[in-house]
Amino acid sequence: MRNGKLQIGIIGCGQIAVQKHMPALAKLADKCEMSAFCNPHIEAAQKAAQRFGTSDAKVFTDYRELLRLPSIDVAYVLTPNVFHAPVTVAAFEAGKHVMCEKPMAASLADAQLMMNAWKKSGRQFTVAYQGRFRDEVRSMYEARADLGEIYFAKAHAIRRRGVPTWGVFTNRELQGGGPLIDIGTHALDLTLWMMDNWEPASVTGQTFCKLAKTLRGADQGTRDHWDPDSYDVEDSAFGFIRMKNGAVVYLEASWLLNVTDEREASTTLCGTKGGAELRGNVLAGRGELVLNFGKYENQFDMMPKQDSGIAYSESRECEPGDIEAAQWIDAILNDTKPLVRPEQAFVVTQILDAIYRSAETGKTVYFG
């Protein structure tokens, strides 16, 4: 720490860093400051340092040089998925706390390397599942006890036409997959968190690329056109997950699907006493919580009013990314557990990896 503040090193200065993480950290100027930036293109690191960094902020193109700085306390790993593991492992070996963008890793093997390094380090570790910090999500979490035993759930990550046309999202080599690993990861994290169930027994999955390669130009149905020739990931993925306690989860993830009911970072919970649904696009701030139950010989749907406080924030006026950053920095300063635990993020990657493997082999993947 310097001047009583945690020193943050930003590794990866792309869109998610500039739009979410760095603005959120800038609002915590009394607790932390960004004093080092790294990006393969030095101009991006320089621009981020000028906008968000300390007056003496350092810039690098090699993350290993940033991690060698003894002054850095926390590393933010905001790179393409395939680099999450090597950068995170190096950060733990350098004695840094780590915030890693979702998903934890591009593969299960990489996620295991990250877990091993974290356990050896004695440092804090979290993964950026900011969907947990939305108002309607927290209300759903608080309502779980009224649903009884949750034995069936759906994890929704469905867009009608929503291929990311920036970054490297459609590059399998750098991302490890398409919508399943990009937006499906949020929906699955929320669903398992709501169920408080992190023990999968088996996974059966299927992936498709039916529209991304065939739709071109105006036929793509959006003004932001993607390049079918360079598109090399799935455009849809589906998984059936059986948990060890007998509960089941259906996961749907797509950037391109001919549906009208688009839901992203959303979940449906079915319990023995009632049900709950998150509708719409939770991450975009258009989520809607609906509870359903039976009483007085009738069936009722209820939409809670979002006007009460939550345990880890004095106000619901903040952006989810702001709340995420605040609780993470406080977890480091106070030596408490962050809301998103690495063990939980590991299970999400474990299931996503199994869906891809099941799709490739045509067989169900079983866990010990």
Image (cartoon, grey):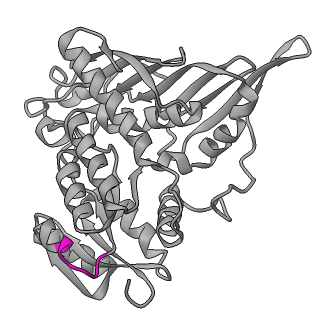
Quarter of the image where one finds residue 14: bottom left
Give the dominant element type of the magenta stretch: helix, strand or loop: loop
Q: Is residue 7 above or below residue 198?
A: below
Q: Position of residue 263 (x, y in %)?
A: 48, 30
Name the one closer to the observer, 40 or 163.
40
Image position of 229 (left or right of 4): left
Residue toward you, 122 or 157: 122
Q: Is residue 69 magenta?
A: yes
Left or right, residue 6 beside residue 45? right
Q: From this viewpoint, which residue is outermost toward the front?
A: 120
Asked whether residue 358 appears in the rendered view, the answer is: yes
Query: Residue 67 location in percent, x, y?
Result: 20, 71
Quarter of the picture containing the C terminus is top left
Does any portion of residue 13 appear in the rendered image?
no
Residue 116 appears left or right of 31: left
Nearer to the camera, 119 or 319: 119
Magenta span of residues: 66-72
Question: Residue 305: percent from the left, percent from the top?
Answer: 75, 44
Identified at 31% across, 45% down, the residue is: 104
Q: Residue at 75% across / 20% down in the picture?
A: 273
Name the residue: 54% across, 70% down: 334
Seen from the viewer's position, the closer of residues 215 and 213 is: 213
Q: In this picture, is 251 found above or below 193?
A: above
